Image (spheres, rainbow, N blue to C red):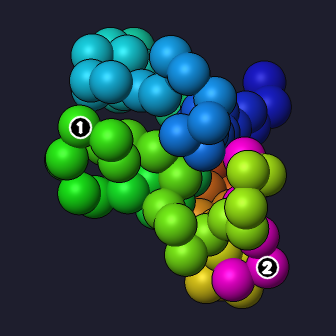
Amino acid sequence: MGLFSIFLVVIVHKTVAGCNRGNNTNIIFLYQFLDGHTNITAFDFFDLLAEKDQGPEDANLLRAAYHEGPDAHPNRTATLEIVSIFVDFVIKSIQQYKITHNML
């Protein structure tokens, strides 16, 4: 048995129509699915990168500060702000997996 991680990265710029999360149904289902599976983790890049403003034009899209122009990919600012959170998640996931499976 190995450790698997799911990365939620469905984030787009408003120029890409119809591709945002829209609601949290999928993430709620995912966390219910993960319950009891000690070898699967989930990291929600979406929540860290998405616009928190729930206005009709910006809701659940890549934050303006995290992209340049029409490019739907996170920029260097986003990378620098999120990388330490992501690395910490990976380290803690590995440590928890080792503890859970008596591998220390």
The percent position of residue 6, horizontal first and vertical second, equals 64, 33
Q: Is residue 88 above or below residue 43?
A: below
Q: Nearer the viewer, residue 67 or 4?
A: 67
Task: Say which mark, if any, is on residue 76.
Answer: 2
Residue drawn at (19%, 47%) of the image: 54
The percent position of residue 75, horizontal first and vertical second, equals 76, 70
In the image, which residues are magenta?
72-77
Query: Which amino acid type is shown beneath numbered disc 2?
Result: Arg
Question: Helix, strand or loop at disc 1?
Answer: loop
The percent position of residue 80, horizontal first and vertical second, equals 72, 85
Residues packed near mark 2 inside 10 Å, few (<14), some (14 to 19) or many (20 plus): few
Q: Nearer the viewer, residue 25 or 99?
A: 25
Query: To which residue does mark 1 refer?
Result: 56
Give yes or no for residue 73 being in the magenta stretch. Answer: yes
Q: Earlier in the sequence, mark 1 or mark 2?
A: 1
Task: Say which mark, if any, is on residue 41.
Answer: none
- Residue 43 relative to residue 33: left or right: right
Q: Is residue 47 above or below residue 36?
A: below
Residues packed near mark 1 inside 10 Å, few (<14), some (14 to 19) or many (20 plus): few
- Residue 94 relative to residue 64: left or right: right
Residue drawn at (53%, 40%) of the image: 14
Give yes or no for residue 55 being in the magenta stretch. Answer: no
Residue 9 in which image quadrant: top right
Q: Which tag is nearer the camera, tag 1 or tag 2?
A: 1
